[in-house]
Amino acid sequence: MTKFFSAVRYGGGFRLIAALALALAPVLWLSVSPQHAWPVVPETYLPIHTAMEVFSVVVSAMIFAMGWHSFEHRTPAAVAVLSTGFLMVGLLDIGHLLSFPGMPDFVTPSSVEKGIEFWLAARFISAAAILAVAAMPWSWICPPSMRYASLALGMGLVGLVFWVILFHPSYIPDTHIEGRGLTPLKIAAEYLVIGMYLLAAFLLLPRASNEGDQRRGGYLAIAAVILALGELCFTMYFEAQDLANLLGHVYKVVGCVYLYRAIFVSGVNEPYQRLQRSREQLRQSESKFRDLMEFAPDAIFLIDQAGRMQVVNARAESLFGFARGRALGSPVSQFIPSWPQCPLDSDVLCRNSSGQIFHAEISRGVLEADGGALTMAIVRDLTERRKLESALVDQLSHDAMTGLPNRSLILSKLAEAMLRSRLSRHMVAVLFLDLDFFKKVNDTFGHAQGDEVLHETVRRIKSQLTDDELVARQSGDEFIVVQSAVKDISEVSELAERLLKIMRVPFSIQGHDVFLSVSIGIAVYQNDETSEEGLLHKAHLALTNVKSDARNNYRYHAPDMERGLKEKVAIEGLLRQAIDKNELLLHYQPRICMRTGVLKGVEALVRWQQPKLGMIPPGEFIPVAEESGLIDSIGTWVLQEACAQAVAWREQGLGKLRVAVNLSPRQFHYANLVAQVQGILAQAGLEPDHLEIEITESAVMKDTESAINTLHLLKELGVVVSVDDFGTGYSSLSYLKLFPIDILKIDQSFVRDMLDNPSDAAIAKAIIALGQSLRLTVVAEGVETRGQAQSLKALGCDEMQGYYFSRPVPAAQIIEIAQRHSPARAGEWVDEISQTAPD
């Protein structure tokens, strides 16, 4: 029932119910009417029977012909079974027709019995064929050999049936007794046939519910049910000419018609529908192809084997400037001169109708057509692409702001110049320029004004160059000038002098005259092994060298510059590992109180004991540390070590011995300096007043507001603050009184020659007087002779340090020095140094 209702649910199900209801009505009427009431038509029955049987035979033949010839080499197995089966049914129905009472004798006399025997044989084969079709998938394909084998087997079986019925009827049990009607065997055989038909209909119902197989399955199911109803009628008749027999033949005819429809759907209608769908799909594909071709962004040609245009699209018309109607049939070579030898997917020259030449890219393919193969040519205009590529190359090789060649292009030009130099024996010079103090323009007036300064710089540089000389922008405020065909080195120097002079002219920025200058590094190629990259590198080394010494000047590259740089790089590499490998150590230089002779404190000085290079002086690695940023980690380590050592000395009984630590300008301006110092003191367990922070005069004056704030925080922490190298910078006395400092240290450059140079002595005297007036402790550095010590003591200097008292020594030796300058023994030293006054 589920299958039945499923079949009803899909399209065609209601037609199936209507057909079955219409077919069932006569049978129901026969079943409720008494047999004696059924009409008998003996006079007209024979011609009616003959007509219906002939019709059935014709339909069976059509079923065979349709199924046998419609599928060629891929015949479905179901069609082969139906066509062969109904050929057999048609032949047996002919035997039935010829054996019916009233017909001429067919080999043996006609009789009801003989007709029934041919009838039952035909019905069994019909039911078996339909049941076999219902049981097998429609997708099964029957090979040609099986078709002929089944046909031969079917014809053999028909021949056997004819032979038995006609020549050996005694082999067959009675199916009809005159005056008594049908025998139980005949009725049972009919019911068996009915059961086979109904089983086939049941199996066909799922196909009737399948959208892909609906019509064929529906027709077969209806045919099976109608034929079953017909067989039911043949179980009811009493006389051969009564209504039940006639109605059974009607059912048979209708059933055959539905069977024919099923074969027609499979063999003719479905292929026709598929053909129509294929034609529609082809039409749509052609329409899509034409639309795609017409609206394609590239020009498209369909060209015949003679090289003439058969089809073109709208883009081809607009690109080549021709009218489509006039162009068709014309040689394509008048627009693509290299056709058909033009290479695929490459730059090809094309010509429009006005004769203008343009670049295009052509792709080709072959299309098979009824009139012969056509070549499809797709032409893509490359004009805009070439413009974009040119613009991109220009962007990649030129500076966006100034329009000058950039580094990549200048390297190419430099390589060409060096090649010409090797041929002409002339020199090539590279001048690397850097604007001095350009940052102050951006910081003061903004980057827009800075860009204007760069534009003006380009104009000034170009004004000093000849046509053979080239300027490029390296980056930022750096420029490269290439001077070719140099015959004498003086030509390079003259160009450098002109560039220095023109750049000294003040720049007018927002009504202000701003004075800038330029530093120039020069490298000269003299037909050696230097590459263009190497030449630029040498010029940049010379620029770095001149900027580190004195700006507003030029300098030629020298070999020692490169050696110094390599040494610096090597030192930096080793220095990065020095802390982790415990290669750094601290020496301490004592500081003596000139009034009491007592050891007041020590200054911590970092040393580097490198395993391979030995003891490296601070003057060699401290500048490298400051440039590379390593001074931060080194300064932190020095603070930690010095504080820890001060605690150790205190535990060894030296009392309050202050340790002084130098801070680099970078360290002093570190945002978390005070918190870092506080943390180190807490970690070491050292009182803040046992630590002295030394800062240089220049570090304090770099950012006075920030410096004052930092110094106040250090003072609040309790740390002693001293200004180192005082007198070498440019501090103002008005600022100095604002700084919360405790100690002024006279630079050793004034102490060294104070006995011979009255100016140095006067400066030292002034610094001591300044410190006393500000109530600061004054310390003299670099005291190396007794005369210097006596003179400074006479001027009122509070403390001194230097080789006269002690060189910087390891921490262990400080204990011995402290004992020598203890309060008990220090008085003797004071008396000794005070005995003779200096001249």
Image (tube, rainbow, N blue to C red):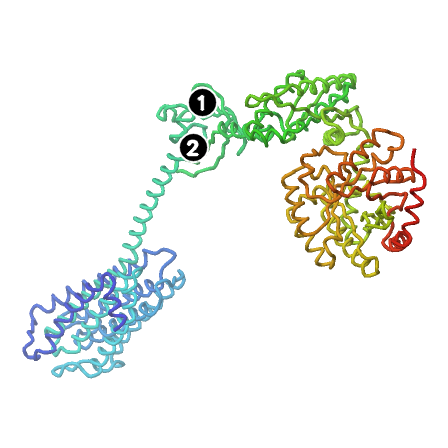
| Residue designated by label 2 | 300
User: Alpha-carbon distance for marks 1 and 2?
Assistant: 14 Å
Residue 158 visible within the image? no
Can you tell which mark lies on residue 308?
none
Q: Is residue 666 above or below residue 391?
A: below
Q: From the viewer's perspective, tell me whether residue 94 is left or right of residue 29.
A: right
Assign the N terminus to one quadrant of the image.
Answer: bottom left
Q: Which sits in the foreground, 291 or 238?
A: 291
Assign the C terminus to one quadrant of the image.
Answer: top right
Q: Amino acid at mark 1?
A: Asn
Q: Position of residue 104 (x, y in %)?
A: 16, 69
Q: Position of residue 286 (x, y in %)?
A: 35, 40
Element at badge 1?
A: loop
C-beta proximity under 8 Å, tags 1 and 2: no
Q: Which sits in the foreground, 401 or 426?
A: 401
Q: Is residue 120 above or below residue 483?
A: below
Q: Quadrant of residue 329?
A: top left
Q: Quadrant of residue 415?
A: top right
Q: Position of residue 651 (x, y in %)?
A: 81, 61
| Residue designated by label 1 | 352
Q: Amino acid at mark 2?
A: Ile
Q: Is residue 760 above or below residue 228?
A: above
User: How many numbered marks appear?
Assistant: 2
